Image (tube, grey):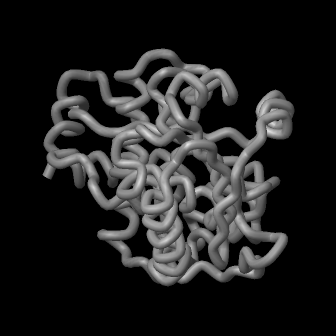
Amino acid sequence: MRRIVLFISFLFIPFFIIAEAQDWNIFKSTHFLVYYDKAGQEQLERLTQRAEEYYNAITDDFGFTRFNFWTWDDRAKIYLFDSQEEYMNATGTPAWSGGQAMASSKVIRTFITAPDFLENILPHEMGHIIFREMMGFDNPAVPLWLEEGVATYQEKQRAPGVKKYLAGRIKDGSFMGLSGLESFDLANSKDREKVELFYLESYSLLNYLISEFGKDRFVLFCQNLRDYKDLTRALALTYSFSGREELESSWRARILQ
C-alpha cells in the first residue's frame, strides 16, 4: 500500500520565528492568503481556485455547522515553501510529511514539489481545520484517529484496496485496532510503515461509520462528541455501541467480510 502521508501540529513556535523573518510574497483570494517566494502565477491561481472549491465542498459534504467564514483579516494562510528541505527546516517535520496544519490559527504549510498537493494534501489539511472549528480546538475527547479519518476522507486520490490490505493485517496480527490508534504517537513516530497504517486504519474506521450508518448519523455523532466531550457517551447516544470494544468488533467484522 502506497499513499501520501500527512502531518498535523497544533503548536510549533519556531516556525513563526522563521516565517516572520522571511520576506514572503502574498497572493490573495476570497478566503486564503498564500505566502510564497518563487511560485508562479499560474500555480498560485490554480492553488487558490482549488482551495476555494474545497472550502465549500468540505462543509457541504459533512453538513458541519460553522461560525467562522475565513474572510478579510480572518482568511486562512497557506505557506508554500520552495523545497522540501526548506519546509522541513522551518517546521521540524519528518521526511514523510507532505503538509502540516495548525487548525486554531488556520495555517497550512507545504512545499511546491509536494506530491499530489492539490488532490490530497490541501483538502486533507483543510479538513483538519474545518473539523476542529466545528468540534472545538480544546476538546480532549476528540481522538486523533477520528480527526485524521475525517481529513483523509477529503482526499481525492485514496489508496485502492484498503479493505483487502487491512484484512491481511488482521489475519497476520499486525492490525493496530482502536486501542493501537488511540495510543499511537503520530507526531513523533519515524516508522513510516506504522504511520501509513495509522492513516489507513483511521480512514477505514471513519468510512465504516459513514457507509454503515450514513452521514447524518455521523454528523450527530460529532455533535454529541462536541457537546458532551465523552467518546463513549457519544458512541452510545449515536450508534448504540456500548463502548470502544463493541465499535472495534463491528469494524473488524466489516473489514473481514
Counting from the top left corner in percent of width and height, residue 112 is at 47, 42
Residue at the image position 33 percent from the left and 54 percent from the top: 250
Q: Is residue 209 left or right of residue 71?
A: left
* Residue 163 showing in the rendered view: no
* Residue 15 showing in the rendered view: yes
Taking depth in this image into account, of 194 and 22 the one nearest to the observer is: 22
Counting from the top left corner in percent of width and height, residue 177 is at 40, 36
Residue at the image position 45 percent from the left and 26 percent from the top: 96
Counting from the top left corner in percent of width and height, residue 252 is at 29, 46
Taking depth in this image into account, of 114 and 222 the one nearest to the observer is: 114
Q: Is residue 24 left or right of residue 161?
A: right
Q: Is residue 16 above or below residue 49?
A: above
Taking depth in this image into account, of 141 and 51 the one nearest to the observer is: 51
Q: What is the number of callouts on the image?
A: 0
When asked about the image quadrant of residue 32, the answer is: bottom right
Q: Is residue 51 above or below residue 80?
A: below
When asked about the image quadrant of residue 174, the answer is: top left
Residue at the image position 62 percent from the left and 64 percent from the top: 131
Q: Quadrant of the N terminus?
A: top left
Q: Is residue 206 above or below residue 113?
A: below
Q: Residue furthest top?
A: 190
Residue at the image position 46 percent from the left and 78 percent from the top: 57
Taking depth in this image into account, of 49 and 151 the one nearest to the observer is: 49
